[in-house]
Image (cartoon, rainbow, N blue to C red):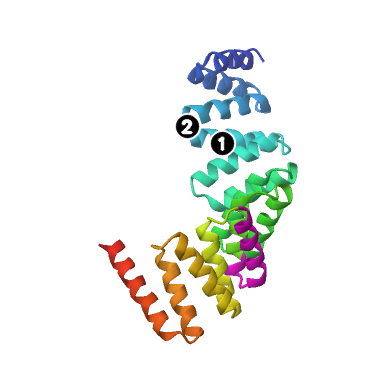
């Protein structure tokens, strides 16, 4: 306990290397001293010694499986290191203990998306929006996930909602147009593309989608113009 107290004293003074040393000695003497592992993990985090921090946080959750904060830290470290499966494990544990953090559900949605687990990604984004209905990034990613799953009705609803609160969200408008086109609602798709190109004339993808949509509507001449513009924009970007 004396060594732990000394470590805390060093920690509070900003003498982080000394604190780590003291916490190491404390846990050598008592390998169940969860507070020493946790303080050491935080000190290592501040020092940028990520691997040591991860080892210590893992020890914390082994000794205290209900320490939500440590799962959060582990998930964050794992995600930064691109250890996706480990990050998913840590964040899943976190939300099982603290189900009211929209940001962590959002993080899980992104991680599930990386793993091509579309249904789980959708579920995570939906949970994020239950906690915080105004979470625009979660709404947008949910819409993208719906498009990926070919759930175009749901995608349309999401992107329309986003555009009500932010009509200048160009990505949302493009994806709304895409969902309409996939549903065969070509007039609506064309209208959204045209609106988008008023706001953002250099959007190459929108010119291409509008060209494809005009073809479906039998407007061959207009389609050709859009394809030409698309090519010019692409070559300009390439050059």
Q: Which of marks 2 and 1 is in front?
A: 2
- Quadrant assignment for the N terminus: top right
What is the x, y in percent for residue 79? 53, 46
Residue ID at (28%, 67%): 235
Q: What element carries label 1?
A: helix
**Mark 2 or mark 1, which has the lower sequence index?**
2
Question: Is residue 33 visible from the viewing direction of this image?
Answer: no
The residue depicted at 51 percent of the width and 60 percent of the height is 171
Name above or below for residue 202 compared with residue 93: below
| Residue 142 counted in the magenta span | no
Task: Residue 100: name its quadrant.
Answer: top right
Please provide the residue range marked out in magenta: 146-165
* Image: 220 above or below 131: below
Q: Nearer the viewer, residue 128 or 200?
A: 200
Residue that mark 2 sits on:
49
Quadrant of the rendering where the C terminus is positioned: bottom left
Magenta portion: prevailing SS class: helix
Residue 35 shows up from this direction? yes
Q: Which residue is drawn at 69% across and 56% down?
A: 126
In this rendering, the answer to whether 217 lies above or below 201 is below
Residue to which mark 1 is pinned: 55
Q: What element carries label 2?
A: loop
Residue nearest the observer in this picture, 10 or 112: 112
Residue 215 vs residue 26: left or right? Answer: left
CB under 8 Å between callouts 2 and 1? no
Answer with the quarter of the image where residue 208 lies. bottom left
């Amino acid at each position: 306990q004396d060594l732990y107290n000394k470590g805390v004293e060093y920690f509070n003074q900003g003498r982080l290397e000394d604190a780590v040393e003291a916490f190491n000695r404390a846990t050598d003497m008592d390998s169940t001293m969860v507070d020493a592992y946790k303080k050491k993990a935080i000190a290592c985090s501040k020092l940028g010694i990520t691997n040591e921090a991860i080892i210590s946080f893992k020890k914390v959750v082994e000794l205290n499986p209900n320490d939500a904060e440590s799962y959060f830290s582990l998930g964050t470290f794992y995600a930064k290191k691109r250890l996706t499966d480990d990050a998913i494990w840590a964040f899943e544990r976190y939300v099982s203990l603290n189900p009211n953090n929209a940001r962590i559900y959002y993080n899980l949605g992104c991680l599930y998306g990386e793993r091509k687990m579309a249904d789980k990604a959708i579920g995570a984004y939906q949970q994020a929006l239950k906690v915080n209905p105004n979470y625009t990034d979660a709404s947008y990613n949910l819409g993208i996930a719906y498009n990926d799953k070919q759930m175009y009705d749901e995608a349309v609803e999401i992107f329309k909602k986003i555009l009500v609160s932010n009509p200048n969200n160009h990505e949302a408008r493009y994806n709304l147009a895409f969902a309409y086109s996939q549903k065969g609602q070509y007039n609506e798709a064309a209208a959204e593309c045209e609106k988008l190109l008023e706001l953002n004339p250099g959007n190459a993808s929108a010119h291409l989608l509008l060209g494809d949509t005009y073809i479906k509507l039998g407007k061959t001449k207009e389609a050709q113009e859009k394809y030409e513009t698309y090519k010019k924009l692409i070559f300009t970007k390439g050059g």
